[in-house]
């Protein structure tokens, strides 16, 4: 039997006979439509293992892993202390606490409760 399989930006035509698979053809898929930006709203925060990027408006707290935002414990304009719980990220059926990396004020909450996030997605900004 011949199957067409799409993985990332490639399409593979695969022939399978008696448990043996042979790739017949590989095609690179090009996207013609412009990507749509995801809406940004709600509150989120960092953990000690999380990535952080300093920007003119503050420090961007990024998701350390892919998951779902279960709860947001802070909001824009809120003063936070180092180690304070900012949000809860569910990943691999575990609840991970994202905490403030330093004292400051939450400038912007980017992630929303219930939103799915990928590794290094911006969650919030602290100044």
Image (tube, rainbow, N blue to C red):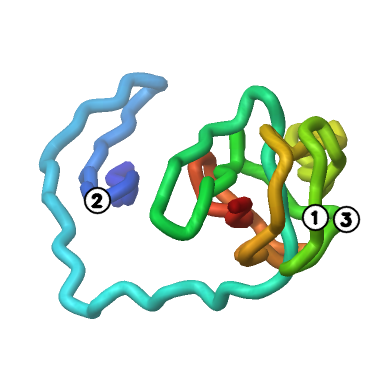
Dot label at residue 79: 1
Q: CA distance from mark 1 to mark 3?
A: 12 Å
Within 10 Å of disc 1 (Cα), the crowding (few <14, some 14-19, many 20+) is some
**Residue 75 seen anywhere in this rendered image of the structure:** yes
Left or right, 33 with reference to 72: left
Report the label total: 3
Q: Is residue 7 above or below residue 93?
A: below
Q: Residue at x 77, y 44 (%)?
A: 89
Disc 1 on helix, strand or loop?
strand
Residue at mark 1 to residue at mark 2: CA–CA distance: 43 Å
Q: Residue 94: horizontal and vertical position, in percent?
A: 85, 32
Q: Nearer the viewer, residue 86 or 102?
A: 102
Residue 9, label in figure: 2
Mark toward the viewer: 1 or 2: 1
Q: Position of residue 71 (x, y in %)?
A: 87, 56
Q: For this view, does 112 lie left or right of residue 81?
A: left
Q: Which mark is residue 120?
A: none
Q: Looking at the image, which residue is at 11% across and 42% down?
A: 25
Q: Is residue 118 above or below residue 20?
A: below
Give residue 99's position: percent from left, percent from top.
77, 37
User: Where on the picture, by quarter, is residue 101?
Assistant: top right
In front: 91, or 48?
48
Front: mark 1 or 3: 1
Residue located beneath label 3 in the image = 73
Label 2 CA crowd tier, 10 Å (few <14, some 14–19, many 20+): few
Residue at the (40%, 55%) spot, across then down:
56
- Foreground mark, 2 or 3, reads 3
């Amino acid at each position: 039997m011949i199957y067409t399989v799409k993985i990332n930006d490639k399409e593979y035509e695969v022939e399978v006979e008696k448990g043996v698979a042979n790739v017949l053809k590989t095609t690179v898929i090009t996207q013609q439509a412009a990507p749509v930006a995801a809406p940004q709203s709600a509150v989120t925060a960092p953990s000690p293992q999380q990535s952080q990027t300093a920007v003119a408006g503050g420090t961007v707290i990024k998701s350390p892993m892919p998951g779902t935002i279960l709860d947001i414990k802070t909001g824009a304009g809120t003063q936070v202390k180092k180690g304070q719980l900012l949000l809860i990220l569910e990943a691999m059926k575990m609840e991970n606490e994202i905490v403030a990396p330093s004292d400051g004020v939450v400038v912007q909450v980017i992630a929303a409760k219930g939103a799915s996030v990928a590794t290094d997605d911006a969650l919030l900004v602290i100044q």
